[in-house]
Amino acid sequence: MYRVLRFFLFLLDPESVHNSLRIVKLVFPILRFMRPSFPKSLARVVDGVVFPSPIGVAAGFDKNGELLPIFPWLGFGFVEIGTVTLFPQRGKPRPRILRYPRYRSLQNWMGFPSAGANKVVENLKSYSSPIPIGVNIGTNWDRPKKELFLEHRILVNKFKGIADFFVINFSSPNTRGLRDLLEDLNFLVELFKVVKDSTYKPVYLKISPDMKDDALREVVEVVLSSSCNGIVATNTTSKTWLIPEAPARGGLSGRVLRSMSLRSLELVNRYIHNRKTVVSVGGIEDAEDVKSRLEKGAQLCELFTSIVYEGPSVGRKIIRGLL
Ligand SMILES: Cc1cc2nc3c(=O)[nH]c(=O)nc-3n(C[C@H](O)[C@H](O)[C@H](O)COP(=O)(O)O)c2cc1C
């Protein structure tokens, strides 16, 4: 059924299709009063937060927290909203998402379009979620590095009564200079301190699949020696040549990212050794993959691109496969 619908949807611009999802808001009044149930065997507690299932929606799918009531219904045990920036911004000019159906992959250079923290807080406050909500926080364009401590502190304070966990995102390839921060270890140490002094909720760092092994090991060491609760691995890859027809910009997600994401998971876990949380994301399409990532040391898994290719039933299919 979704295959037929997908044929028509893929004739349209990806972002327009995505934005048309807002039509589901029409059924929110009904969904708000119904509590979806999850098989009890899938529930787990991670850093003090109860997750009804270990498979959630990755950042970028619901940037402004506008679609929250649908995720539990689609079988997702949590959602990471954002990236949310402190001030509203439009991101890069459209079109800024491309599909590659043959590779089951997407390419995006969105550049953090965000309604801004105040608006997103308003969206979140209007809904009491039956699943945990993580807020992925990021920086506006061209912010001087020294301002980022204060901005992250303000962001966390705005969401601290509402978010179940936070993800700090310095791994997007679409904001100039952002990924350099991942390799500035003194900056990370100071930032974790500022953020964790502002909240007792779990805080994770999202990393890039393009990091060299040594840089990745150093980041893990900083996480281990700080109060940061763990790592989300990974964001999209800038190795756009993995798809010969792709322009050299932005980042690739989906099937072409899978092996890089798996390698990051293995490396991160080799250094972390279950001492902190690892969330695995990148190219997940089915329950077998989720199972193997949980076995390889991930506590939680997330996906985005396979919702586009497999359809909205992918969350429920994975749940069935995990039982
Ligand atoms: C269109 C699009 C927008 C994204 N926006 C964000 C974002 O705002 N913040 C972020 O941390 N990751 C963002 N991501 C990356 C995803 O969260 C995820 O890390 C990546 O897509 C790999 O997972 P997947 O292969 O299941 O899609 C985005 C991905 C896509 C495809």
Image: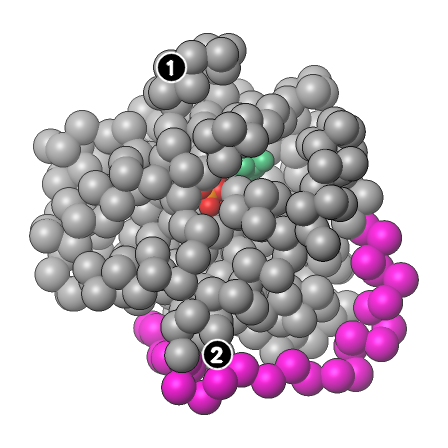
Task: In this rendered view, identify the residue nearer to me: 39 or 125.
Answer: 39
Type of amino acid under label 2: Pro
Closer to the observer: label 1 or label 2?
1
Q: Position of residue 206 (x, y in %)?
A: 37, 45
- In the displayed structure, would residue 56 be above or below residue 130? above
Type of amino acid under label 1: Trp
Residue 109 located left or right of residue 45: right
Quadrant including the C terminus: bottom left
Residue 292 located left or right of residue 221: right
Earlier sequence position, callout 1 versus callout 2: 2
User: Is residue 4 at least partly visible in the picture?
Assistant: yes
Q: Which mark is residue 127?
A: none
**Residue at image mark 2:** 52
Task: In this rendered view, identify the residue nearer to me: 85 or 143.
Answer: 85
Quadrant including the N terminus: bottom right
Q: Would residue 43 be counted in the magenta stretch?
A: yes
**Residue at image mark 1:** 241
Q: Position of residue 52 (x, y in %)?
A: 48, 79
- Residues in magenta, as a range: 22-50
